[in-house]
Image: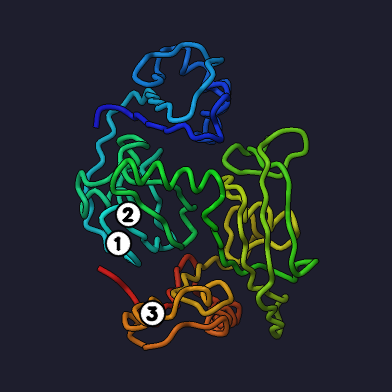
Amino acid sequence: MPNNTTKLLITDKEAGQRLDVALTKFLSELTRSNLKKIIEKKQVKVNEIIINSAAKKLKTNDVIEIDLGSNEEINILPSKIKLDIIYEDNDLVVINKPAGMVVHPGAGNFKDTLVNALIYKYKNNLSDLNGNTRPGIVHRIDKETSGLLVVAKNNKTHADLGKQFSEHTITRTYQALVWGVLRPLNGRIETNIGRNKKNRQLMSVLELSGKRAITNYSTVKVYDLKNIPKISFVECDLETGRTHQIRVHMTYKGNPLLGDKQYGKKNINVNCISPGFISTEMTDKINDEYKEVLKSKIPMNRFGTPNDIANTVIFLCSKLSDYITGETIHVNGGMYFS
């Protein structure tokens, strides 16, 4: 693949915005000044017409094509990697991404990503609205986060899903283990998040700059264990999708995620728990018929419980695990997919 080209579809939400403003929402890793330079270098097209003005106003259904101008060829090779497919039809596929897997190729990660696996399995039968380096990718989650990702097989489905994410008609709920007890137990965190001024690889809560970030959280259970601080099992619903949002917000509250190498406490063993299907108020909303299908795929023939996760946490927090670090522990009843 000779270049790093990304295609974007403008929805009603972005209509009327300047070109550079809209692009900052899609390409959060680039600053507005960086994007302005890319536009001025004539690396951006709107509806196949080259645009060199960052002030151009956009309309609904405009298609933006942006060449990020990589100086080296990006050759994305297919990789035979097991995919945990939860659901699939002619238009989309829902994949349970494991912790430790990068979603799409980028600096330092050009192989063994989810995209490499998708190209191996689906070849050219994926949407290309997000360009050559992100076929089928509608949204993403962090490398160390496990969870469901929706992948589009065609551009119409990609555009429809993108609109639903933009309008927040799709609910994204994340489960996490954090140190201590959140106060209040259930609440809403609303701040600005942007690049850390001292370390640009990290994100921080900012007062006068950054982008609005909203996290609604609820405490499912608090574990009061012997000889270690309390641990809380929480669920977070995101109204926005900022980089490292949950990790930054939980640290801001004083309750960093367990095993967080970048934002959490230092000088501790760092391990990751990758849960399978866990029975909570969130998963109780899934219809019974589909739950039976899922259960039939679990060798232990039952769903996990918060206590299954807690028992693993107790082990990892005990002296029995003193010599274990850098590991991902799968608590999934043996449910793996090829």
Quarter containing the C terminus: bottom left
Res 130 → quadrant: top left
Q: Of the numbered discs in the image, which one, if any, rests on residue 312? A: none
Residue positioned 25% across, 36% down in the render: 75
In three-dimensional space, the C-alpha distance between marks 3 and 1, rounded to whole angstroms, equals 16 Å
Packing grade of label 3 (10 A; few <14, some 14-19, many >=20) is: few
State the separation of the CA atoms marked 1 and 2: 6 Å
Task: Name the residue beneath numbered marker 2.
Answer: 92
Name the side, left or right, on which 20 lies relative to 331. Answer: right
Disc number placed over residue 289 in the picture, else none: 3
* Mark 2 residue element: strand
Query: Where the N terminus falls, by quadrant?
Result: top left
Question: Label 3 amino acid?
Answer: Glu
Give coordinates of residue 110: x percent, y percent. 32, 43
Select label 3 or label 1 by which is in front: 3
Query: Which mark's residue is nearer the viewer, 3 or 2?
Result: 3
Task: Give the camera-side residue of 169 and 216.
Answer: 169
Residue type at the position of mark 1? Glu
x, y (%) of residue 126? Answer: 27, 45
For the point 63% across and 73% down, which residue is it? 233
* Marks 1 and 2 close (CB-CB < 8 Å): yes
Assess disc 1: are there few (<14), some (14-19) or many (≥20) residues with their C-alpha within 10 Å of its C-alpha: few
